[in-house]
Amino acid sequence: MRSLALAAFAAASLFASVEAHAQAQQNFAMVNRSGAQIDEVYVSASNRDSWGRDILGDGVMPSGTRRNITFPRGTRACEFDIRVVFANGQRRETRGVDLCQVSTVTVTPSGRFATE
C-alpha cells in the first residue's frame, strides 16, 4: 500500500513538472538597457513571414525596465525573431533566438541584443 502511494505521488510530481515546463518553455524577460525608450516589441516564430502585432500594445518600455513576455500554452516553436522599435523610429532585430534555452533578452546601449 505504501509503495502504491509513493508511486502515485512520483507520477503526479512528474506530470506536474512536465506541465509547468510545457507552459513556460519559451517565456522570457525582455530588459531595456539601451538608454532609449522602446515603443514597440515584436516576437515572431523564425519560420513566419510577418511580425504580427506589437506585444507592448499601448505601452512602452523606458530604459531600465523589464517586461515578462509569455507565450500561449501549447506553443511549440523554439526559434524566434525579435524586433524592437525605439521612440526615434530606429529598429533593431535579432533572428533565430532559441527561447527554449534563453530566459532573458537584453537590449544593450549599443542597440544589440544579449541573451542569457
Image: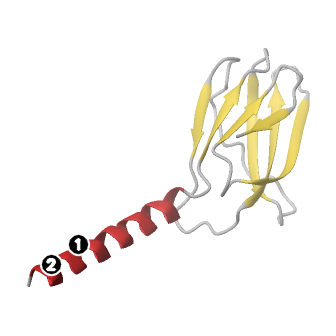
Report helix, strand or loop for mark 1. Answer: helix
Q: Locate the N terminus by quadrant.
A: bottom left
The vertical placement of 5 against 41, above or below, is below
Q: Nearer the viewer, residue 111 or 9?
A: 9
Callout 2 amino acid: Ala
Q: Residues within 10 Å of mark 2 (few under 14, many from 20)?
A: few
Q: Which of 38 and 68 is in front in this view?
A: 68
Q: Along the horizontal axis of the image, is 85 left or right of 22?
A: right
Q: Which residue is rendered at x = 68% and y = 48% of the image?
A: 102
Question: Rounded to the nearest whole Å, what is the CA distance between mark 2 and mark 1?
Answer: 6 Å
The residue at which mark 2 appears reads as: 5
The residue at which mark 1 appears reads as: 9
Q: How crowded is mark 1: few (under 14 residues within 10 Å), some or many (20 or more)?
A: few
Q: Are marks 2 and 1 in contact (CB under 8 Å)?
A: yes
**Residue 111 location, quadrant:** top right
Report helix, strand or loop for mark 2. Answer: helix
The vertical placement of 87 against 78, above or below, is above
